[in-house]
Image (spheres, rainbow, N blue to C red):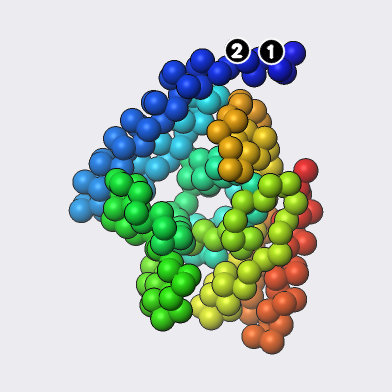
Amino acid sequence: MRKLLHILYQPYKWLFFFPFLIINTLFFCIIAILLSFYSQKAAGFCGVIWARLNSYLTPISVKISGKENIQKNTSYIIVINHQGHYDIFLIYGWLGIDIKWIMKQELRKIPGFGICCEMIGHIFIDRSNTQVAIESMNKVKQKLVNGTSVVIFPEGTRSKTGELAPFKRGAFRLALDLGLPILPITLNGTKDILPSDSLNLFPGKAQMIIHEPIFVNKYSEEEINTLIADVSKVISSALK
């Protein structure tokens, strides 16, 4: 039955959804750029509409739990497992707080998308240039006030199996440096909707579990590996 549904879904995917995704992405990018001259938060709201619209049209169902763990006007280092392309839709559409992304410098080159992300305050990191990367992280620090949080995928890339890959240290060094709490989030189901390095899109169910914040003031710089292990344990505890 699933194979039959997959075959029937292909005309919708190729003739409607993907073309409409490209068009509405460009449209919302233009609106976001214009709004950014007034307010970056207002521009960021375009991302919410964009994410929900395309999620509903896929279609996918989304289940959220743990939103009570987010305290208003508190900035977080948000650490999330990375399963697939639809992680972006879940976070943008349903997290419900002002966020900035740390993004690979290569994404800055995408026409329309790159300038849009820069205008609404996302940060591009050039991993090949240490000095430039440090300057970019200093920009991140300036933005994390009054409830604005940063989203980081500590695995560094999408997991092809759904299992957690080893975490890189950047997010945890930033949390320790700024004394900001880490907000661990577990995503389930997105790798089955649109797998990594694939266009094999298919409707499905996705889940976001927002865990209790982990306060870093009980960890020293020398205990960063312990902090990483504790956050990894929390995220993996809800993985399916």
Q: Element type at marker 2? A: helix
Local packing at callout 2 (Cα closer than 10 Å; few below 14, some 14-19, many 20+) is few
Q: Specify the quadrant that holds the N terminus.
A: top right
Q: Which residue is labeled 2 in the image? A: 8
Q: Residue at x 37, y 44 (%)?
A: 45
Residue sitting at x 58%, y 29%: 201
Q: Secondary structure at mark 1?
A: helix
Q: Quadrant of residue 235?
A: bottom right
| Residue 88 visible in image | yes
> Where's residue 9, x and y in %?
58, 17
Please state if 162 lies on the left or on the right of 100 as rendered: right
Q: Position of residue 192 (x, y in %)?
A: 67, 35
Q: CA distance from mark 1 to mark 2?
A: 6 Å
Residue in the picture at 51% in, 78% down: 178
Badge 1 amino acid: Leu
Q: Is 37 in front, or is 130?
A: 130
Cβ atoms at labels 1 and 2 below 8 Å apart = yes
Residue type, numbered disc 2: Leu
Q: Which residue is mark 1?
A: 4
